[in-house]
Image (tube, rainbow, N blue to C red):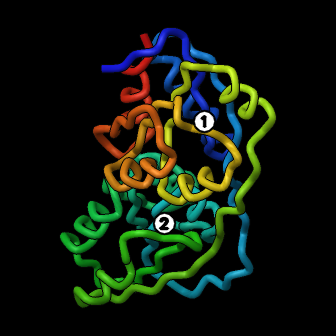
Amino acid sequence: MLRFDNPVVLVTRPEADAQRFVDVLRTVSGPFSAIISPSFENETLSAEIPDFETAIFTSRAGVAQAPRGNGRLAFCVGDATARAAKDAGYISISADGSADDLVTLILRQRPNDALLHIRGETSRGDITKRLNDAGLRCKDVVAYRKAAKAPSQTIRDALAVNEMVILPVFSAETVSILETWPLNFEGCAVVAISDLVAGASATLLPLNVVVSPAPNVHAMAQATARLIA
């Protein structure tokens, strides 16, 4: 496996999420330099949240746009989202995986509640449709969107002069934003959170692509750490 000695790790998540990833990575990897340059920020939309009994969350951003849980149940795509939902007053259940895992979890439990998926403008997995097709009662509401940001000068300089660059990528939507940046990613090693994101990342023409063994921050950190000598 390709390994880098003291590489630059470019993290393009929103500031708080990026810093959280860097902190986790430092606990499991060798030395590296981190550059945080968010490719987007979550922008609240003026959406009216309808009445619901049980929430569905596919991101912590969705939790941030939701009303307080007040003891209501929330089905969550992963552990970090479940922790955020718990902090917001929900009884959270984590699928610890992907949108497919989340749908499987909900169908296994088959709640008779009015379900509401509070989501972003771009959503993969057709969660609401699949649940309704299976006979459940589910609505969704688009409560936020990803507003693209330009690359920082620091990230421009790093890509221009550094030959050891690792780029963790957490969504296909992020790839679509990175494609618009006037930068050359051909010397980067991409760490993709899923096979879907790995396929999308091919358009960046990276040096190589590694797929995380699970779609969560800790698995992404472990996969990234394996590229660091």
Q: Amino acid at mark 2?
A: Gly
Tell me the quarter of the picture where residue 110 sits. Answer: bottom left
Residue at point 68% right, 49% down?
181
Identify which residue, 156 or 149, lies in the foreground.
156
Quadrant placement of the C terminus: top left
Q: Amino acid at mark 1?
A: Val
Q: Residues within 10 Å of mark 1 (few under 14, many from 20)?
A: many
Residue at point 60% right, 21% down?
8
Q: Residues within 10 Å of mark 2 (few under 14, many from 20)?
A: few
Residue 57, position as x, y percentages in the image:
47, 65
Element under disc 2: loop
Q: Is residue 139 above or below residue 228?
A: below
Identify which residue, 162 or 134, lies in the foreground.
162
Residue at point 72% right, 69% down?
44
Identify which residue, 69 or 32, lies in the foreground.
32
Tell me the quarter of the picture where residue 109 sits. Answer: bottom left
Q: Is residue 153 above or below residue 227?
A: below
> In this figure, which residue is indicated by the disc labeled 2?
71
Residue at point 59% right, 78% down?
142
Q: Earlier in the sequence, mark 1 or mark 2?
A: 1
Q: Is residue 168 above or below residue 8?
A: below
Residue 95, position as x, y percentages in the image:
31, 56
> In this figure, which residue is indicated by the disc labeled 1?
11
Nearer the observer: mark 1 or 2; the answer is 1
The answer to whether 88 appears left or right of 198 in the picture is right
